């Protein structure tokens, strides 16, 4: 049995009723991040150096677009800093949901080799029930659970299974990282194979995969299809993203789409000349509206869908 849907959202600054979230949600972001240990010094959002720019961007998005909630998917091995997340949430007056889990294999921590699926699930459940470290702050989502290639590697499969078991035990949902959009169907099969309902799953980075039939298959299964790298033009143009999104909407799957920008380098911050967390609102949604989306559809994609993903409400 899957645990019943969580009645409230668990944010870094406390429990929150989904009904009180009146403005849009960013479904996959990073506010503090450190992937430098893999030699990528640009993939850093430093808790000291970048804190002011991150907080200021979020505060201005709250004022300009009503941004209400950020789902922050930095997990174990990615430089997660839960204390700083709480400070950003307070400074910007934005609700932030924090994550637990493991990213894809290059970022796995040694505990993955040394433990079995149940042991890893236990580690995640303890963080979800008792809080991260000694902060008492509890994650509200499992993510971004990663794999790369068309089929997850053995350690990645182990982590996906552990995440599914932890999700079932705690009533949280699972957001994945499908590297360059690939392997989403295999991720979903592993997660649902552990008894997790598809509507408790979001398959990440699907806007990097130019395969509309895969998007339709994921959505038809009940899983969320995350177009979560909006504005990352070096990977895929927004013009292609828009075409893929419109195809999914036209196929009748508007209620399965999640949108975000996945800011994962300090160079993406507005302050440093990047597209910023607001690219979705400033650039992409106007293009979607020009293609015919009305207020209700935009509200569905940017608010009701991510809330339903988090709480586990089926429809
Ligand atoms: Zn990410």
Image (spheres, helix red, strand yellow):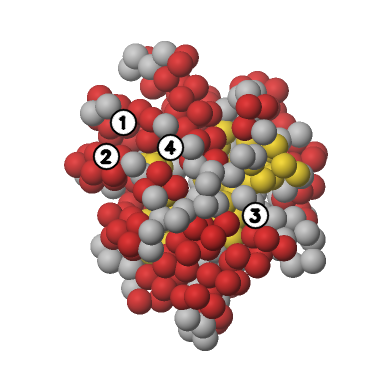
Kindly check if marks 1 and 3 are in contact, taking CB atoms under 8 A apart as contact. Answer: no
- Say which quadrant the C terminus sits in: top left
Q: Is mark 2 within 8 Å of ligand 1?
A: no
| Tag in front: 4 or 1 | 4
Q: Quadrant of residue 220?
A: top left
Q: Is the C-beta of the residue carrying label 4 under 8 Å from the nearest atom of ligand 1?
A: no
**Does residue 186 lie above or below 216 as drawn?**
below
Q: Which residue is mark 1?
A: 253
Of residues 297 and 189, the one nearer the viewer is 189
Q: Secondary structure at mark 1?
A: loop
- Marks 2 & 4, CB-CB < 8 Å contact: no
Residue nearest the viewer, comparing 117 with 92:
117
Q: Residues within 10 Å of mark 2 (few under 14, many from 20)?
A: some
Identify the residue under disc 2.
Answer: 220
Q: Which residue is mark 4?
A: 314
For the residues marked 2 and 3, what is the alpha-carbon distance in whole angstroms?
28 Å
Which mark lies nearer to you, 3 or 4? 4
Callout 4 crowding tier (Cα within 10 Å): few <14, some 14–19, many ≥20: few
First in sequence: mark 1 or mark 3? 3
Label 3 crowd (10 A; few <14 / some 14-19 / many >=20): many
Q: Number of marks in the image? A: 4
Looking at the rendering, which quadrant does residue 231 occupy? Answer: top left
How far apart are the two marked residues, 1 and 3, measured between alpha carbons?
Answer: 28 Å
Secondary structure, mark 4, is loop
Q: Is residue 212 left or right of residue 284?
A: left
Find residue 101 and report its horizontal and vertical position in percent: 54, 63
Kindly identify the residue that appears in the image at 50 percent across and 75 percent down.
118
């Amino acid at each position: 049995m899957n645990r019943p849907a969580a009645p409230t959202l668990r944010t870094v600054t406390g429990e929150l009723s989904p009904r009180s979230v009146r403005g849009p949600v960013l479904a996959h972001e990073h506010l503090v991040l450190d992937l430098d240990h893999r030699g990528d010094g640009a993939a850093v959002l430093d808790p000291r150096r970048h804190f002011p720019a991150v907080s200021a961007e979020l505060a201005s998005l709250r004022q300009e677009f009503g941004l209400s909630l950020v789902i922050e998917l930095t997990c174990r091995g990615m430089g997660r800093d839960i204390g700083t997340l709480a400070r950003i949430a307070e400074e910007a007056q934005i609700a932030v949901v924090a994550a637990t889990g493991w990213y894809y294999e290059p970022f796995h921590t040694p505990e993955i080799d040394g433990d079995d699926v149940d042991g890893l699930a236990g580690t995640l459940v303890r963080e979800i029930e008792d809080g991260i470290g000694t902060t008492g702050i509890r994650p509200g989502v499992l993510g971004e659970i990663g794999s790369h290639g068309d089929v997850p590697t053995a350690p990645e499969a182990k982590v996906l299974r552990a995440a599914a078991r932890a999700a079932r035990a705690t009533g949280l949902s699972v957001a994945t990282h499908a590297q360059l959009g690939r392997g989403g169907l295999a991720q979903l099969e592993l997660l649902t194979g552990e008894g997790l309902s598809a509507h408790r799953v979001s398959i990440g980075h699907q806007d990097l995969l130019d395969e509309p039939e895969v998007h339709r298959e994921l959505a038809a299964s009940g899983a969320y299809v995350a177009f979560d790298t909006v504005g990352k033009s070096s990977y895929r143009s927004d013009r292609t993203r828009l075409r893929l999104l419109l195809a999914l909407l036209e196929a009748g799957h508007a209620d399965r789409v999640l949108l975000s920008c996945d800011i994962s380098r300090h160079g993406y911050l507005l302050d440093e000349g990047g597209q910023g967390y607001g690219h979705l609102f400033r650039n992409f949604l106007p293009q979607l509206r020009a293609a015919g989306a009305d207020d209700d559809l935009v509200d569905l994609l940017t608010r009701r869908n991510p809330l339903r993903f988090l709480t586990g409400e089926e429809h």
